[in-house]
Image: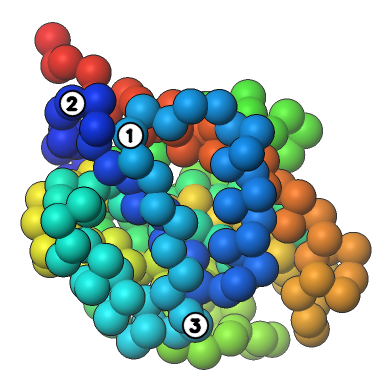
Amino acid sequence: MGDVPGPHGPAAPLLIACALGIEQLALRSGRRRAGDAPGPVTVLRTGMGPKAAATAVERALGEDRARGAAVIASGFCAGLAPGMHPGDLVVADETRESGESTSCTGAGLLAEVLARTVPGRTVHTGPLIGSAHVVRGHERAELRATGAIAVDMESAVTLRTALRTGTRPVAAVRVVVDAPEHELVRIGTVRGGISAFRVLRAVLPAFYEWHRSLLLPRR
């Protein structure tokens, strides 16, 4: 899937899926200063958890206006690698869940563009694993042992559902809200949560550049 071009034409849509209201708020507020998108953009709040994400994404992509849409799963995540900090960015090269993996489109380009778009923030690239619940304590080490660098509940099922509805570019970009040395209890009530919110609010220009690259003619 990583080399499949996206839909062509100036009106190609982009669907950005996130789980939480605070994630949707960050992404929507970032749109006002992100510049022009190369096509229609929808920021979809799916609700929390894999089942809610699958249902919401399937419904959204079934609408005529979303036909052929590129899909980015975004929002917050838990970092698994030692040395990660709140506000770091994770670009998935693949998502994993229940023994299945989904390759992401243009992960290298996304990582490069994000590094320019959000200077001063570390960008990590690697496998993003899905979980049906919030991961704490020893579970982090177990997931890290699989090679994953971060975990969230919706990205893997979002991308799998998106591809089940048709061939399309897919990606996952998450902002670390807690990490092994910086475990948080409640998003938005501590400094790490606020830092992650600000980073998520700044990512839209990178998403647009990734999306725009998919529309260029292939040589």
Measured Cα–Cα span from mark 3 to mark 1: 27 Å
Query: Which residue appears at 42% of the width and 74% of the height?
Result: 46
Q: Earlier in the sequence, mark 3 or mark 1?
A: 1
Q: Which residue is mark 1?
A: 39
Q: Residues within 10 Å of mark 3 (few under 14, many from 20)?
A: some
Query: Which residue appears at 48% of the width and 27% of the height?
Result: 36
| Residue nearest the viewer, comparing 80 with 171 | 171
Could you tell me residue 129's position as x and y percent? 43, 69
Measured Cα–Cα span from mark 1 to mark 2: 9 Å
Name the kind of residue labelled 2 in the image.
Answer: Gly
Q: Is residue 60 left or right of residue 209?
A: left
Q: Which residue is mark 3?
A: 48
| Residue lying furthest top | 219
Query: Which residue appears at 18% of the width and 62% of the height?
Result: 63
Q: Which image quarter: residue 84?
A: bottom right
Q: Which residue is mark 2?
A: 9
Could you tell me residue 42's position as x and y percent? 40, 53
Name the kind of residue labelled 1 in the image.
Answer: Gly
Q: Residues within 10 Å of mark 1 (few under 14, many from 20)?
A: some
Name the kind of residue labelled 3 in the image.
Answer: Met
